Image (cartoon, rainbow, N blue to C red):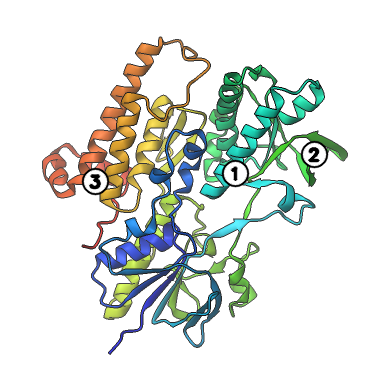
């Protein structure tokens, strides 16, 4: 007799990790993952895709590669309807599935808050396609600017406005403030003509965010880039046109000419959530669905909701990779427990700190809100930590090894216009970075390739326990 499947909607962090953990637990029921894209997107590393520090195959692996050898079936489609009462979903291409359990992990999309012209004229930055589209736009602007005689037109081409000074806006601004000068200098232009403007409605960057404690560090790095990032705070964007940004500041209307406008000003949950029979009191103002501590949807115990689609009223969590990873693991555990009649567990999410990219080859790692490591070493810790979160050990091992090799051989590296900015010689800086890369990458590669051997040989040092706290072990692929 055919068993009714567990269906997972969305192949982001929550959906993919739920599927992999569930397969690892040898759950007898079929697992169907519905995802429209052919590649997983590791969003925290999209900046590295933009700069060329890492390549597409490292950051956006194919689902077929990630799921190879598992019993997970991936269906390339989007969801048309969800019928919670009939336990049935219908896909856009017409296929319908009945489910025994459902996981809603559809993620979010950019929201423009009804700002006129924003959807048409601003570029989002949430997918690999977004990153490549932005890259092409920027390169076109630079190539046009270098042959433009009119100073005003050249300034327009060389101005980039980033809307929203949350983590994504800050990280993107820092990255572009190092990257664009390199590109423009290579074309023969004067890189000091480039303007990167970070526009924010609030009077502070990173306001109300988990990264807010890094505010001063972020400000320092924003000003200390190859070209300093300009902060336009207390500026309410009223419209975005093909020519730039209209805004109000202190009651006065103004205009920022910019040929490139990037929107990082906010997201909203997947619009399909609005169609579900969930009462208004079980939704927040963003449209997320309130779930139980077990991540079950209220009144529908067979349905689990995670990531950007859900919230637990008592414990609001930031939309970060580490939260999504832990939610995926908890949902998989509870699905198995529910099937076996065991008690479910609350999804305990342990925030181990925050990581930010603050320029090419520079970053900050705030560990347990106690230790802040910044600069090149902060960048290496961020990179190594995210690589260890890649979905399966064999892919994790391969990508971490490539990252380490690239660092030693300086492949996929964007050159700096100021190699001696920190006061060290290029040789000393290179040796320092190589040594730090080796110290960070070696245990990561060892644990990814031979987890049991690593645990046995290093247990007495306490390193496995520390790494489990900083970087949770990734999912073992079901063979």
Secondary structure state at the residue bearing disc 3: helix
Q: Mark 2 = which residue?
A: 243
Does residue 351 sit above or below 5 in this rendering? above
Q: Is residue 191 visible?
A: yes
Q: Mark 3 = which residue?
A: 448
- Whichever of callouts 1 and 3 sits on the residue coming sooner in the sequence is 1
Q: Is residue 196 visible?
A: no
| Rendered-image quadrant of the N terminus | bottom left
Label 3 or label 2, whichever lies nearer to me, is 2
Q: Judge by depth and name the residue closer to the eye, 407 or 186.
A: 186
How many numbered marks are there? 3
Q: Are marks 3 and 2 in contact (CB under 8 Å)?
A: no
Gap between marks 1 and 2, in whole Å? 18 Å
Q: Are marks 1 and 2 in contact (CB under 8 Å)?
A: no
Gap between marks 1 and 3, in whole Å? 33 Å
- Whichever of callouts 1 and 2 sits on the residue coming sooner in the sequence is 1
Q: Mark 1 = which residue?
A: 133
Q: Position of residue 31 (x, y in %)?
A: 34, 73
Q: Judge by depth and name the residue closer to the eye, 79 or 206.
A: 79
Left or right of 142 in this view: 172: left
Q: Are marks 1 and 3 in contact (CB under 8 Å)?
A: no
Q: Position of residue 255 (x, y in %)?
A: 83, 36
Q: Residue 346 bears which disc, if any?
A: none
Does residue 225 sit above or below 286 in this rendering? above
Q: Position of residue 44 (x, y in %)?
A: 47, 44
Does residue 1 sit above or below 416 in this rendering? below
């Amino acid at each position: 007799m055919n068993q009714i499947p567990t269906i997972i909607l969305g192949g982001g962090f929550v959906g993919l990790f739920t599927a992999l953990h569930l397969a690892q637990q040898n759950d007898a029921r079929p697992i169907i993952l519905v995802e429209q894209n052919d590649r997983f997107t590791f969003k925290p590393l999209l900046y590295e895709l933009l700069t060329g520090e890492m390549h597409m195959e490292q950051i956006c692996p194919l689902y077929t590669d990630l799921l190879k050898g598992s019993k997970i079936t991936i269906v390339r489609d989007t969801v048309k309807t969800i019928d919670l009462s009939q336990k049935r979903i219908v896909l856009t291409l017409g296929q319908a599935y009945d489910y025994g359990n459902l996981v809603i992990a559809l993620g979010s999309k950019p929201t423009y808050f009804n700002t006129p012209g924003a959807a048409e004229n601003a570029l989002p930055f949430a997918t690999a396609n977004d990153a490549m589209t932005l890259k092409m736009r920027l390169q076109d602007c630079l190539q046009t600017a270098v042959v433009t005689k009119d100073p005003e037109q050249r300034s327009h081409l060389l101005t980039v406005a980033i809307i929203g000074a949350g983590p994504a806006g800050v990280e993107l601004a820092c990255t572009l403030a190092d990257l664009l000068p390199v590109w423009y200098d290579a074309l023969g232009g004067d890189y000091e003509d480039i303007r990167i403007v970070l526009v924010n409605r609030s009077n502070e960057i990173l306001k109300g965010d988990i990264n807010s404690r890094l505010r001063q560090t972020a400000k320092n790095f924003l000003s200390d880039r190859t070209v300093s990032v300009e902060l336009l705070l207390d500026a309410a964007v009223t419209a975005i046109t093909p020519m730039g940004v209209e805004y109000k500041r202190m009651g006065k209307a103004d205009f920022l000419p910019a040929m490139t406008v990037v929107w990082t000003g906010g997201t909203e949950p997947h619009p399909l959530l609005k169609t579900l029979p969930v009462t208004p009191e079980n939704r927040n103002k963003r449209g997320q669905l309130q779930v139980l501590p077990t991540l079950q949807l209220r009144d529908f115990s067979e349905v689990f909701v995670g990531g950007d689609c859900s919230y637990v009223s008592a414990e609001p969590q930031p939309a970060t990779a580490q939260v999504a990873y832990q939610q995926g693991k908890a949902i998989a555990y509870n699905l198995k427990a529910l099937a076996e009649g065991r008690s479910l567990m609350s999804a305990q999410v342990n925030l181990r700190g925050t990581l930010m990219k603050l320029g090419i080859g520079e970053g900050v790692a705030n560990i347990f809100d106690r230790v802040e490591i910044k600069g090149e070493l902060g960048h290496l810790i961020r990179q190594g930590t995210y690589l260890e979160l890649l979905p399966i050990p064999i892919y994790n091992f391969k990508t971490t090894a490539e990252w380490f090799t690239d660092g030693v051989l300086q492949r996929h590296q964007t050159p700096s216009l100021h190699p001696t900015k920190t006061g060290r010689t290029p040789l000393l800086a290179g040796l320092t970075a190589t040594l730090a890369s080796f110290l960070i990458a070696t245990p990561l590669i060892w644990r990814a390739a031979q987890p049991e051997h690593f645990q046995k040989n290093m247990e007495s040092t306490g390193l496995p326990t520390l790494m489990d706290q900083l970087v949770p072990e990734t999912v073992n692929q079901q063979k």
